[in-house]
Amino acid sequence: MPELSVEEIARLARKYLAGDPTVEEAQRLNMALQDDPQASLELLTRMQEALDQAQPGGMSPADWQEVDASVEALIREKASHSSGPLMRLKVWLLKHSRKAKAAAAAPSRPAARTLAILAGAALALALVLALAYAMVARGGLKRLQGLHLHLPHLGAAASPAQPAAAPAPSPAKPGAALAAPAPALAPVAPAPAIARAQPVPSPLPLAAKPGTAVRAEQLPSSAELPSELPPVTPMPSGKLDIEQEP
Amino acid sequence: MSDDELVAGIRAGDAAAFRGLYADHKAVVERSCAFFLGDDPGMKEAVAGTFTAAFDEIASKGQPDLPLKPWLSILAVRYCMPVMERRRIECLSQARELEELARRVPVLQEITRDDRERVNFMVRGEIDDIPEPHKQILAMHEMDGLSILEMAKRLNAAWVTVLSRLYNARLALRDRVKAQFKA
């Protein structure tokens, strides 16, 4: 069938809607409807223009229920026909890309959620810092305790085998030591040479670990030792490692 | 979902895409069909047929040349056309029956030899005794000579609705004339 001109389509549509087309005109319009979208649009436009005052009533709710059921049955049939593994994969891919697009198009995270995440991160950081601080503090405490234990070696190392004959001031608790003001320590004089520690009878009754090396120069002589030693107060901070001194 | 996503989903056999197309466009299809069919019982088959054709065409040919909304409207008009033709042919046959009836009325045979004029005289003779709403529609069509489209415009009714009313009015006229003349 030769393609109809726009004018011819308009004429056929007008005659058809007027209700008096010839048999041949009705056939031509029917064929044009199948081939040319213009024919459908022409009919639709003319009816819209004629009924621009009011839209004619369509289907009732009961009609819609019937049509919905019929289309749903059709959809089930068509969807089940294309339910092979390849089709399922295509559907999955389609949905996946749809979700990705939706996620890309979605607005950014709400401020409250971002704030909550930041607050959580800050809390975690604070916990880590507190733990680290606690560990450092504990290490320092241990060092302080070690210092406290080491200082009596000054005497104990000189007489390792000597039993505790006289009561000695009990070592202060680390906490108490920290609370007490630390006396200024005299700078340690550089030792010219390291001598083997000799067992020296010490009035200090502190138990010393056998084999602890102490510089002889650092040891006071018996005469110099006071009858009563002042209580030893550990350093609150800093590292005093006697053995590392040059 | 966009048109592209709906088409891609239907081609992939995604039931959600089928349902999405139907839900998004059923009102458009109904509106297009209602201009022609109104409350005619053929409306249901036209709407369902439009979506059947749409699913088939998308599955076989892919993306339509037009956006889905006008494309579905065009499909809807195609699916209205068989119903319109059926009603038009019924009315045409009825008009022939009336002409045949008028030909058998002796008074009308004496007035004119033209079939359409005889029917016109028949309507004029009976119009006052024909009840509404048949009276109005017969007067508009047979006496005032209004076309179907003109009557649809004046009555704010769908094209097929006008044909149906005309059909029923003619039935009433025929029954009355038959009763009077024992034709």
Image (spheres, coloured by chain):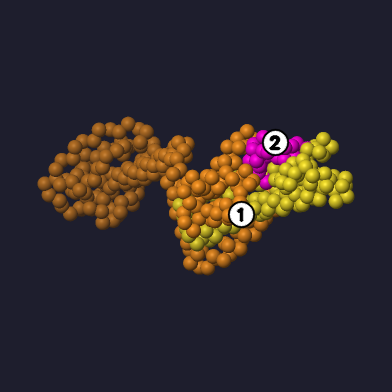
Q: Which residue is mark 2?
A: B144
Q: Closer to the camera, B36 or A26?
A: A26
Q: Residue furthest top?
A: A181
Does any portion of residue B2 appear in the rendered image? no
Image height of B157 relative to B72, above or below: above
| Quarter occupied by residue A73 | bottom right
Numbered tag placed on residue A23 in the rendering:
1
Which chain does yellow denote in the image?
A: B
Chain rendered orange: A
Q: Position of residue B29 (x, y in %)?
A: 59, 47
| In the rendered image, the vertical position of residue B161 relative to residue A184, given as above or below | below
Q: Residue at x 32, y 31 (%)?
A: A181
Q: Which residues are magenta?
A: B135-161
Q: Chain of mark 1?
A: A
Mark on residue A8? none
B151 inside magenta stretch: yes
Q: Provide residue B142's location: percent of width, then percent of height.
A: 72, 40
The image quadrant that residue B34 belongs to is top right
User: Given the image, on which type of amino acid does mark 1 rest?
Assistant: Val
At which x and y percent is residue B138?
Answer: 75, 40
Secondary element at image label 2 = loop
Query: For mark 1, does the 10 Å Cα neighbourhood hold few (<14), some (14 to 19), or many (20 or more) residues?
Result: few
In the rendered structure, which amino acid carries the disc numbered 2? Asp
Left or right: residue B183 compared with residue B118: right
